[in-house]
């Protein structure tokens, strides 16, 4: 974790079992402000923590799942995640964006592109970040999951790199909620 101080109270950040937060021992871990452990009438002095990955796509066990967040920020993150979940789980994202693929470039990087058509065994695609149109062999393209597509759409709307909601600050999360909710309202 990049910080060892709580952004809310300045307390030390500790890496502990999640049982200190939810009372259940599951072999999972959390980054928690030391003042979370100090209680007054059962209420923590500081209610700041973030869960840690058991593993992630890169195998970095113990990496935080987001930023250290107090109760207010965690609730806003939850609201944004629920709205984004609705966008992709109800397949609304497919009505908003066409066929989106990931394209692997020669350096091993990945860019996202929209499918335009096929001709002579090649695929014509347009990159979503530059509007550049190219023709590529189909093996250079991979279908992306609806959840990734929803995060890509949100990043394009916000003009930011793809960022998991758990890493957003309060203001950015509110902006994300408003963008997603406005889009969902179009499909009611």
Image: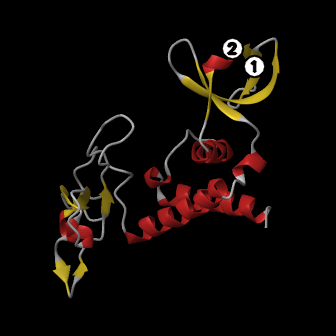
- Residue 146, x across and y down, in percent: 62, 46
Q: Nearer the viewer, residue 170 or 94?
A: 94
Does 171 sit above or below residue 36? above
Location of the C terminus (image quadrant): bottom right
Examine the image and state in which quarter residue 133 appears: top right
Residue at the disc numbered 1 = 123
Q: Nearer the viewer, residue 171 or 176?
A: 176
Residue that extends furthest to the bottom in the rendered view of this protein: 41
Residue at 31%, 57% in the rendered image: 51
- Residue 94, x across and y down, in percent: 73, 47
Q: Nearer the viewer, residue 140 or 158?
A: 140
Q: Tag on residue 137?
A: 2
- Residue 59, x across and y down, in percent: 31, 36
Q: How is the image coloured?
A: secondary structure
Q: Nearer the viewer, residue 2 or 65?
A: 65
Examine the image and state in which quarter residue 9 appears: bottom left
Does 115 sit above or below residue 165? above
Q: Are marks 1 and 2 in contact (CB under 8 Å)?
A: yes
**Dot 1: element:** strand
Residue at 79%, 62% in the rendered image: 187
Examine the image and state in which quarter residue 19 appears: bottom left
Mark 2 surroundings within 10 Å by alpha-carbon count, few (fewer than 14), some (14 through 19), many (20 or more): few
- Residue 172, x across and y down, in percent: 54, 55
């Amino acid at each position: 974790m990049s910080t060892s101080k709580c952004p809310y109270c300045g307390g030390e950040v500790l890496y502990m079992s999640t049982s200190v937060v939810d009372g259940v021992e599951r072999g999972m871990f959390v980054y928690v402000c030391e003042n979370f452990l100090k209680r007054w009438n059962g209420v923590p002095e500081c209610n700041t923590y973030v869960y840690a990955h058991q593993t992630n796509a890169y195998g970095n066990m113990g990496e935080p799942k987001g930023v250290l967040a107090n109760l207010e920020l965690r609730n806003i993150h939850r609201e944004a995640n629920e709205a984004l979940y609705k966008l992709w789980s109800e397949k609304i994202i497919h009505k908003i964006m066409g066929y989106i693929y990931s394209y692997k470039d020669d350096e091993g990087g990945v860019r996202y592109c929209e499918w335009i058509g096929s001709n002579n065994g090649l695929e014509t695609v347009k990159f979503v970040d530059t509007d550049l149109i190219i023709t590529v062999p189909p093996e250079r393209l991979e279908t992306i999951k609806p959840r990734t597509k929803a995060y890509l759409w949100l990043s394009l709307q916000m003009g930011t790199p793809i960022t998991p909601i758990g890493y957003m600050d309060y203001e950015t999360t509110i902006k994300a909620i408003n963008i997603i909710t406005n889009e969902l309202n179009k499909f009611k």
